Image (spheres, rainbow, N blue to C red):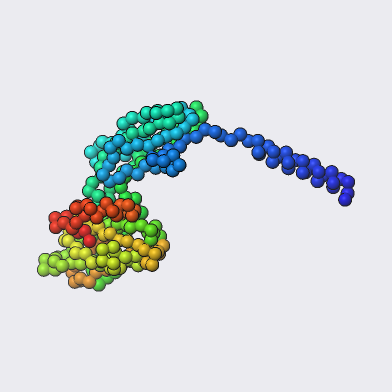
Amino acid sequence: MNKHVFIFLGLSLAVLLASCKKVDERPVRSDYIKVYETSESKTVDNILIPFEGAQDGKIHVLSNLPLQWKYLVDQDATGTDWFSIKSVEEIETGHWVVTYDAASLLSLNSLSRREGRLSFSCPEASMGKFMTVHQGYKRLFLEDFSNEPDQTVCLTGNQTYATEEYSVLAADYYDFISFNAWAVTSNEFLSKNITLDITISGGLFYDINQTTYRVNVPIGTGAETSNLQYILLMGNDDRMSSKTYFTFSVNNDDQVFVHVDNFAAYQVTPADMGELFIDEDFEEEDDGGDWV
């Protein structure tokens, strides 16, 4: 081998070894902030508040740094904070217990969602941890069907309307879908027994184990609470897919116009399902929207 080539290879190898040694000698940061609820071996990055709220809820914070505390939550309709920290107690060096209260979000069929942020930080060490605090169902999508506020899906006769595919609906979860539906007609005789069919492609409605559900549509002039329909659907490995979409269809007189707007889906975990079936407010009521 050429002498100069051998010398070059030797120098290259020396540089490479020196670089590796330099990487290995980088200091490893020993500072930490860890949060858990019940077990130190299972840390958490968010706090999920149950629908019934929480009194004296607790999280544990472990850190080898002096920490500062802040929290910010959105306010409810009354203008008051629904989540508050009652105390922060250092029970031993580097181990704090944070106790909090949270108001209820009842009834359990509410589609409201509340969120906030809780932070622990040490500015001197340029280190911090942020926790999300949330309560209520996670909204997966909301369709107003138009960029114009007064526009809706409008169906008459035997027309249909198909939505786009919703890949956010997964087989491992239960989901609420909600929408506003109201009818307009100039013929009072036709104002009764107006119906709307909702069909899932890639899913099943939970309580009837079918792909199509029919609802009665009230006479109205726009989207309001009295014409908001809630439908519980369930996916499974055989039917729910990443190509799920919905079809709205009518079979009414040509003088009847059914409007659909504010179509949304909310994720419901299996744990939520156990709560739903013991909630009396989940039963169908005569004086409110249709629960189907």
Residue 108 to residue 164: above or below: above
Q: Look at 20% across and 71% down and name the residue there.
A: 252
Quarter of the image where one finds residue 229: bottom left
Q: Look at 32% across and 61% down and name the residue there.
A: 234
The location of residue 92, given as percent across then percent down, is: 42, 28
Answer with left or right where residue 124 lies relative to residue 147. Answer: right
Quarter of the image where one finds residue 117: top left
214 or 32: which is nearer to us?
Answer: 32
The location of residue 27, given as percent across then percent down, is: 61, 34
Q: Look at 26% across and 63% down and name the residue there.
A: 207
Answer with left or right where residue 2 lies relative to residue 97. Answer: right
Please say whether residue 50 is visible from this viewpoint: yes
Q: Look at 50% across and 34% down and name the residue there.
A: 32
Please say whether residue 142 is visible from this viewpoint: no
Residue 74 to residue 191: above or below: above
The location of residue 64, given as percent across then percent down, is: 49, 30
Answer with left or right where residue 188 lies relative to residue 102. Answer: left
Q: Quadrant of the C terminus?
A: bottom left
Answer with left or right where residue 275 lies relative to residue 47. Answer: left
The location of residue 93, given as percent across then percent down, is: 45, 27
52 or 170: which is nearer to us?
Answer: 52
- Tally of numbered tags: 0
